[in-house]
Amino acid sequence: MRLIPSFTALAPFLILLGSCVGPGAQQPVARPVPAPARPSPAAPAPVPQARPAPVAAEWQYRPVAPGGWTYRAEAAGSSAAFGPGVADAQLTLRCDRASRRVSLARAGAGGVQGALIVRTSYGAASWPATVSAGAAGQLVAFRAASDTGLDQLAYSRGKIAVEAAGAPMLIVPAWAEISRVIEDCRG
């Protein structure tokens, strides 16, 4: 009779021992391999259609014009010119220390007097402009050196756009040369 109580005491351990056995090894299932499809000789391969590049409607997403800024110290102040070369500048920012004014000249604007629309990351502003007496087809706008519109030019994030009647929008990078000219007039 002593066997029965000891067997009953071991029964829970025997049950737990049976749960320690892992699943048996499974045989891999053989799957049928489909035959490779042959292209039909009559069906030509589709030609991918060329899609036109999407046009960005907002000026800040358009690419900048080719060229770069060039800074020059002058006797009367300083200037920064943007373009492919110094001789063919498309946009010029000039400081006149005597009058403490900064001028912004846009080349290729035709002979139409009006305004320059200056767009920065702060917004758009209309700068009254006149046709330059020195260079044909150039509109020039003047601002006092203390004007906050110049700060918007200097601190614009990435790009500046200048629009003039009769000329395409000119988008230029906002580089340090702009700030140097403005600071020359203020200092």
Image (cartoon, rainbow, N blue to C red):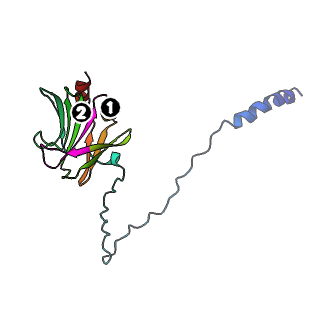
At x 53%, y 56%, the residue is 29
- Residue denoted by label 2: 102
Queried whether the magenta region covers residue 180, the answer comes back as: no
At x 60%, y 45%, the residue is 24
Left or right: 37 as drawn, with respect to 173:
right
- Residue denoted by label 1: 147
Sequence-wise, the earlier of marks 2 and 1 is 2
Determine crowd level at label 1: few under 14, some 14-19, many 20+ residues with C-alpha closer than 10 A. few
Where is residue 56? Give x, y as percent. Answer: 34, 53
Residue 73: image quadrant is top left
Name above or below for residue 118 compared with residue 33: above
Which amino acid, by three-letter code, is at mark 2?
A: Val
Where is residue 158? Give x, y as percent. Answer: 31, 38
- Whole-number angstrom distance, CA of label 2 to CA of label 1: 9 Å
Helix, strand, or loop for circle 2? Answer: strand
Left or right: 149 as drawn, with respect to 29:
left
Where is residue 80? Give x, y as percent. Answer: 19, 34
Boundaries of the magenta span: 129-150
Where is residue 45? Give x, y as percent. Answer: 31, 70
At x 12%, y 45%, the residue is 135
Q: Disc 2, disc 1: CB below 8 Å?
A: yes
- Looking at the picture, tell me which residue is in the foreground, 181 or 155: 181
Left or right: 77 as drawn, with respect to 159:
left
Which amino acid, by three-letter code, is at mark 1?
A: Asp
Queried whether the magenta region covers residue 139, the answer comes back as: yes
